Amino acid sequence: MNYGDPSNPQSGRAQVPGFQPEPPSPNPSAPPAGRAQVGRASVGGASGSASVGSARPSGSASVGSARPSGSASVGGASGSASVGSASVGSARVSPPESRTGRASVTGSASVGSASVGAASVPGAAGRATVGRAVVGSAAVGAPLGDVMEGPGGPGGPGGPGGGKGGSGGKDGRSATAKAKKRRRRNIVIVSIAAFIMIAGIGMVSGTYYFDQVGLPDDITLDQQTTIFYSDGQTPMGRIGENRTVLPLDQIPKDMQHAVVAAEDNSFYTNDGVDYKGVVRAAWNNVTGGDRQGASTISQQYARRWAELEGVTYARKVREAVIALKLNQQYSKDEIMAMYLNVVYFGRNAYGVEAASQAYFGKPARELKTNEAMMLAGFIKNPSGTGKGSPFDPNIDKAQSLVRFNYIKDQMIALNFVPQAEAETRMAFPTTVITPQQSRDRQIAATNMDKPEGLIVHHVLGEVAQLKDPRTGALLYEDTDNDGKKNFDKIRNGGLKIVTTIDKDIQPIAVREASRNKESNMNGQPDNLQAALVAVEPGTGAVKAYYGGDKGSGNDYAGYYNDPVLGDGKDSCCGGHPPGSTFKVYTLTTGLMAGYRIDSMWNGDSPADFPASGRTIKGGNPVKNAGDGSPSHPQCESGSSTWCTLAEVTEKSLNVPFFALAEKVGPDKVIDTARAAGITDMWATQNGKAVKIDMTAKTGKELFPTTFNTEVAFGQYPVTVLEHAGGIATIAAKGYAAKTHFLKEVWDQGKRTYGEVINPKRIPGFTDGMSDDINVVLQRVPRHYKLDKLKDGRQVAGKTGTWQFGQNGSSGGNAHAWMVGYSGYDANNKAADLAVAVWVGNKGDEQPIKDKKGTSVIGGTLPGPIWHDFLDAALTQIKAPKINFRPAANTGRLDVGTGISPTPALPSVDPNNPGNGGFPQTQNPGNGGPGPGNGNQSQGPGGNGGGGAVPTTTEPRRR
């Protein structure tokens, strides 16, 4: 907040609240005898004494008559006069003999203490320090109880020709005598200040101090920011200070009355200040009595508003001035609304809305009279000794009852509730939520301890990256006093953040991918972890996300850069080798290069590819893997050397896809993945897995320096999130929309951001190619019996695995995937979902096996999770049933690397797949170094490929 600064007045006369002087008499140099001209201070005069109103030659100070000049003289001394941080009136230092030495002194105004600059006059050397203003021979301005004593100047106390000054501790007086003197001075100055305060508003208004104590410029309160599901109505989580600001019309009248009854009976009639209370507080603070606050509702609010602390009289005066100004500028209803949104009720509840939830589990607008009275009672002592308010019946029922009955009596006395209704409306509440229940509710409301906590991190990262279109600066970034950046405007700004997450689909994702009785993960070995992401084709909106069980845990579906609740750096756990699921992008590249889906390819394994450094002689040929006969797969032609592109995709044969990548260029495969929405991949550099920004370089720049030909069958890790986005692009006929979590941002009821959907098609991709890919990918779910959805709708997908062990010889897999989608209609965007599912290890990699001890492949655990989620989600949102179009048979190239045994070409009708075997989708072969985290996971890349890869570079750009 920004506040007015009363401690820095303009140069010139220093004034304190006081009576306004009457118009001057005909002879202004001779005011009526006995009138105190409060507001001007003379220090010394001829005798060097301190005077409020007038100075007497004897060196004493008096109240009742005033010197016309009001000037301060310090003998003929040459030196400086200092008066703390507040002066009464104006102070001048003038030698009695010389006009030329006269100096005006500037100062700052406050009651009880002030500083009056320094003045140098000709004469004997010396320095007069005036500590505080007292009646007698005291000084003006030092804090109560802190007196600086020392030798006086000429003509002043203790100086030549003056009374006895302070000894500076060297005159032999006892400490007790000094303490008594300080005590007397305190009592006198407080009495004067209290007199000035009690005299009324008329004395305060118009004075310099009253004018200088300004109201804070910013009355914005920290309050919770709420994250919502895509409907904008269902909360997903809350962050920041536990406060929700309410307008007064949403706060029950009984709540307002209960607070008046409990805290300030005269609220509706007073001017904001309890003058008797101020005097009592001042007297007790000086005399050692109870250090009482003595504050009205306006004063309490002023204290919180201006962040005033302590119980000193100086604070009370400033608090009172602000309270007076509040009542001049705002109505009682406005002050009440502000107060009820600020005040602390205990249980980490700021404001009445948070308090109502914390103690009664309901919004404030639903509070009953007796519940409102209970809440009002907590304000007096919200925290107690740390366990909670002593007026909480869960803490001390006896004290709670006493406090409640007091408020009840006040409610009746103030005519807020008729006596006849007292027993029915103001019965002691029987149920108040326990402190533990309140804590549990607050934790649950944040949702950070649930799977949705990861979504909160992702969306906050996106909000933090929003820019002001006028300046290009980050919209919500701020700077601390020490120069460090922060995003408190997001955390405590009371924003309404709407995500893309569907409230009906998200629970299905959690159910299917987490460990519960309804999930395929139920009972699986403890080392297994699943992740699932669903993206809407055509928009890139993330509709469901499961990366782990808690927002504070690892994110196995991706990573986030959250500077609001985190440090803004990449979180764990990055990407996983996608294996054969990445062949979708290689297939797409092949079609754009002119190859037909019925073009012929050699499927024999192992195979030499000397251009890529993969040869049998060199010990690193490319191999197939899978069920059936991966070395000599049985294709529809009857020959393993004459297989259609559709078949080798279905069988997930590595040799033909490596050949396809060489023919079209691995750089083109990389560019297709980039255009589909893959912005990050990991590669091994200097023995470490490094995240590669795919948006910064083209395929030609990345191949072969960063990625090798093995990119064609998924050696290099990607995130589940981005893979789902890339598959959504394939589902949307090649139109890529930025994958995102953020739908809208609202600030103070105004929308400051709305998602921008601007899909761009993969260059060279056509509707016919989309139809061809859909026909090919339908065959994979059919093989694993994953194609039967409840309503009979068609689905398309691709499985994939990445092996564990040196050169893939262990026989086990470290990663297994299933990706795919249902039918898409551009005119009905909600009709389709693209889903990616990964299953791997929570920690150090090892072969992944299911509860039966069988090696996990794409179709046996990720596949069923994918199927069950897609079936339930599409049913839940009542998505229209859309069938895929038949193959368009685009392309001109009929032969790739195939060696034909006969001139006939086989059919590629997905409804007549033939009798060939369908291998399990695995990632075979061995070869160059692959990414990893130092464990034994390897496939074609070898040397530790795969795994939950830590990320170390800058935030991604989706």
Image (cartoon, rainbow, N blue to C red):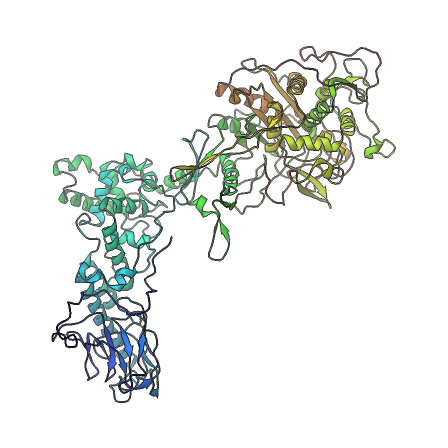
Q: Quadrant of residue 699?
A: top right
294 vs 654: above or below: below
Whether residue 839 appears in this view of the structure is yes
Q: Tell me where residue 78 appears, x and y as whole percent.
A: 34, 85
Q: Tell me where residue 373 appears, x and y as whole percent.
A: 23, 42
Q: Residue furthest front?
A: 26
10 vs 133: above or below: above
Q: Tell me where residue 872 appears, x and y as whole percent.
A: 52, 20
Whether residue 857 appears in this view of the structure is no
Q: Tell me where residue 314 appears, x and y as whole percent.
A: 28, 64
Q: Residue furthest right?
A: 617
Q: Quadrant of residue 771?
A: top right
Q: Quadrant of residue 637?
A: top right
Q: Is residue 149 toward the left or the right of residue 841 in the image?
A: left
Picture residue at 61% right of the left edge, 22% below the top: 733
- Looking at this view, is 606 or 718 the one in front? 718
